[in-house]
Image (cartoon, helix red, strand yellow):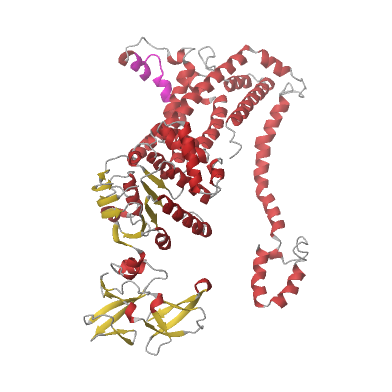
């Protein structure tokens, strides 16, 4: 590009004189890069290669040392005894076998599965419809609602607040249940059957990915809805034929994030129910149990559990990709 | 098919964003009245923000006017919802339903209204035949894979398929590239002729308006400045705005002093076409109404010559006394730095020195 731009004016001024000179610097259009050029006017292709490498190198090294290396090492470690004070010994699938037989692992996977299903139905799909409904409001109302919903809240602070609200003796929810609804005292987080449901509920209020949906919905030209309106389409039909198809790629992407996020749930259940996932491990997710293993210095077992979780998450993501695959003719 | 009457429509937007409060004080539509005869195409032309799209939406029923009445065949439809008005609207961005094939887009209306599948298919087939050669293939493709021109054809078919009483087109071809625009507008014109459906066609391109419209409405600032055939707008403009807006290249407007039946312009004295009261006036001359190379002409400094071989003509661009002037000349007009030009006084427009009042227009050209 740069070379041809430089040559064009010369050719216009004196075509006959410029041609031989051009031939000196460039051996011809098909002759590869020029043999010798001034330092400032190198062939862009080669310079781009060097620059590309230079620019990518830091990111590559970073990713290698903090991303891939630990991952691969964890994988390797899971086949050893991961001893700390003496040489590491290869133990094959021993850790995997031990983890497979551990009843607490099975329980933690059950907990995580229920938690994932609950949190995806309640905090992933509900916001899609809430966002679509919000967009039906007047512009001024939309702004106020967004402000309320997306007030920057500290994660830990609001989690602690929720722990107070769930308190079985003096919590706000207990007050609502007994004084307002007239129900018998509820156990909330103390019930093994209910704890996962109540863990997911605060997520609804945080409105999850709603902002992204609303931004996408706002980018749909008004004419699409006007065209449908002229043809007599009502709210639901407009939603099915315009809003949801336009949201589809975003939904697909965010669903992956949601799956990965909830299979790896750790902080929120830990703060709400303690490291043991009380009552009786009913809220102990896989990563919480993994953390417990680490605290017991069972590194090999912990990494083996991590590999199991990775395989399951990966499988879910692959299934999701299949399910959301774009139509072949688009 | 219908006769449409738009009467004294006023529309104010309360919360116009940006541009400060001055804009929201001015109504988007200020007492607009318009009649569309049965089967007539009216092109609405104006620069962006002049209210032409708002007018279209009010006729469609997508917006409610603050004052005024819209009538279809004498029936007041101002409060009628858009789907009950029987209008078909074509949008600038086509607005085809995503993730549907062309067919699905055509069947949408029938699905919404709970008609049978057979009816939808039969009507789509009928429409495809009317749309012309090669249209049927488009119906089996997903709309994302179609080109802009093809998408617009599907969008037009989507309107035709349910036989609207009125067609509303909101800059339907301005997203297409120049070459496609040319052929698509010919095609749309043909279709409009064929179906004989009353049409409101909004555009910002005056050439498109001239091509599409049986009559043209020129809009500015929420008002219709003039409505008429091209000849009426071109030769008998209602005011200075219409005179300069219609015509490309635009009319030259030069200040002049009238005294005793003579007009003094840039040092030259020309006889006034009509009796003009003494004092300052302005005269308007279209590019084709100039004579070149006359001794008693005004001196024009030439900046460049634009030659158009297909028209066998050239436009000489330059200035007279600092005012930009365009003169139509023969294709072989020699390159000179200066030119003596004089208007054909029978084809001169006279305007008041201030304001936009038109004192004299030459009227239609007598060709035979």
Q: Nearer the viewer, residue B178 or B301?
A: B178
Within the magenta stretch, is there residue A172?
yes
* Residue B111 pos. (x, y %): 44, 33
Which range is magenta? A159-177
Q: From this viewpoint, is residue A212 visible?
A: no
Residue A183 in the image: above or below residue B107: above
Residue A109 in the image: above or below residue A17: above
Residue B304 in the image: above or below residue B7: below
Asked whether, in this view, residue B87 is left or right of residue B182, the answer is left
Picture quadrant of residue A305 = top right
Asked whether, in this view, residue B306 is left or right of residue A143, the answer is right
Residue A62 in the image: above or below residue B298: above
Q: From this viewpoint, is residue B215 visible?
A: yes
Magenta stretch mostly in which secondary structure? helix
Point out the image quarter for the N terminus of chain A: bottom right
Q: Nearer the viewer, residue B242 or B23?
A: B242
Q: How many marks?
A: 0
């Amino acid at each position: 590009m740069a070379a041809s731009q430089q040559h064009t004016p010369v050719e216009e001024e004196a075509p006959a004189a410029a041609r031989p000179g051009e031939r000196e610097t460039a051996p011809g259009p098909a002759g590869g890069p020029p043999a010798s050029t001034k330092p400032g006017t190198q062939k862009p292709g080669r310079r781009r290669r060097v620059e590309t490498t230079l620019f990518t190198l830091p990111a590559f090294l970073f990713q290698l040392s903090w991303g891939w290396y630990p991952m691969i090492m964890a994988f390797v470690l899971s086949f050893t005894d991961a001893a700390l004070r003496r040489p590491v010994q290869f133990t094959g699938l021993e850790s995997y076998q031990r983890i497979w037989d551990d009843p607490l692992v099975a329980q933690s996977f059950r907990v995580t599965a229920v938690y994932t299903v609950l949190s995806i139905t309640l905090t992933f799909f509900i916001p899609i419809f809430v966002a679509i409904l919000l967009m039906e409001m007047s512009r001024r109302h939309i702004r106020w609602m967004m402000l309320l919903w997306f007030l920057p809240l500290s994660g830990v602070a609001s989690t602690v607040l929720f722990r107070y609200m769930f308190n079985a003796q003096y919590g706000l929810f207990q007050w609502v249940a007994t004084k307002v609804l007239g129900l018998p005292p509820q156990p909330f987080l103390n019930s093994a059957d209910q704890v996962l449901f109540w863990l997911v509920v605060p997520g609804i209020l945080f409105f999850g990915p709603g902002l992204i949906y609303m931004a996408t919905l706002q980018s749909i030209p008004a004419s699409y809805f006007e065209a449908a309106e002229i043809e007599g389409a009502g709210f639901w039909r407009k939603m099915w034929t315009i809003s949801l198809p336009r949201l589809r790629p975003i939904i697909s992407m965010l669903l992956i994030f949601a799956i990965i996020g909830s299979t790896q749930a750790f902080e929120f259940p830990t703060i709400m129910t303690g490291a043991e996932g009380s009552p009786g491990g009913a809220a102990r997710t896989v990563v919480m149990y993994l953390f417990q293993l680490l605290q017991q210095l069972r590194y090999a077992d912990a990494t083996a559990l991590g590999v199991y979780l990775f395989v399951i998450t990966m499988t879910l993501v692959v299934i999701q990709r299949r399910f959301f695959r774009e139509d072949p003719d688009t | 098919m219908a006769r449409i009457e738009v009467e004294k429509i006023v529309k104010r937007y309360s919360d116009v964003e940006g541009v400060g409060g001055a804009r929201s004080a001015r109504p988007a539509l200020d007492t607009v009245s318009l009649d569309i005869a049965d089967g007539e195409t009216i092109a609405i032309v104006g620069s962006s923000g002049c209210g032409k799209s708002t007018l279209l939406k009010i006729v469609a029923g997508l917006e409610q006017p603050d004052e005024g009445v819209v009538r279809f065949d004498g029936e007041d439809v101002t409060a009628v919802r858009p789907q009950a008005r029987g209008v078909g609207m074509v949008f600038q961005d086509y607005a085809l339903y995503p993730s549907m094939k062309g067919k699905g887009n055509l069947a949408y209306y029938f699905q919404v209204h709970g008609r049978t599948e057979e009816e939808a298919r039969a009507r789509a087939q009928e429409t495809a035949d009317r749309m012309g050669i090669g249209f049927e293939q488009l119906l089996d493709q997903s709309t994302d894979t179609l080109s802009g021109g093809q998408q617009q054809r599907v969008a037009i078919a989507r309107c035709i398929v349910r036989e609207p009483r009125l067609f509303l087109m909101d800059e339907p071809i301005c997203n297409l590239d120049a070459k496609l625009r040319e052929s698509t507008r010919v095609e749309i014109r043909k279709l409009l002729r064929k179906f004989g459906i009353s049409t409101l066609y909004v555009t910002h391109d005056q050439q498109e308006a001239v091509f599409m419209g049986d009559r043209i409405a020129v809009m500015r600032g929420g008002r219709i400045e003039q409505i008429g055939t091209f000849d009426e707008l071109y030769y008998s403009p209602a005011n200075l705005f219409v005179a300069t807006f219609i015509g490309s290249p635009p009319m030259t407007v030069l200040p002049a002093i009238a005294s005793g039946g003579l007009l003094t312009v840039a040092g030259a004295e020309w006889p006034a076409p009509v009796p003009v009261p003494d004092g300052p006036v302005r005269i308007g001359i279209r590019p084709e109404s100039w004579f070149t190379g006359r001794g008693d002409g005004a001196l024009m400094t030439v900046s460049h010559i634009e030659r158009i071989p297909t028209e066998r003509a050239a436009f000489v661009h330059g200035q007279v006394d600092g005012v930009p002037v365009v003169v139509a000349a023969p294709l072989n007009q020699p390159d000179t730095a200066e030119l003596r030009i004089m208007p054909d006084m029978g084809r001169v427009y006279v305007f008041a020195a201030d304001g936009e009042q038109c004192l004299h227009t030459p009227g239609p050209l007598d060709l035979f």
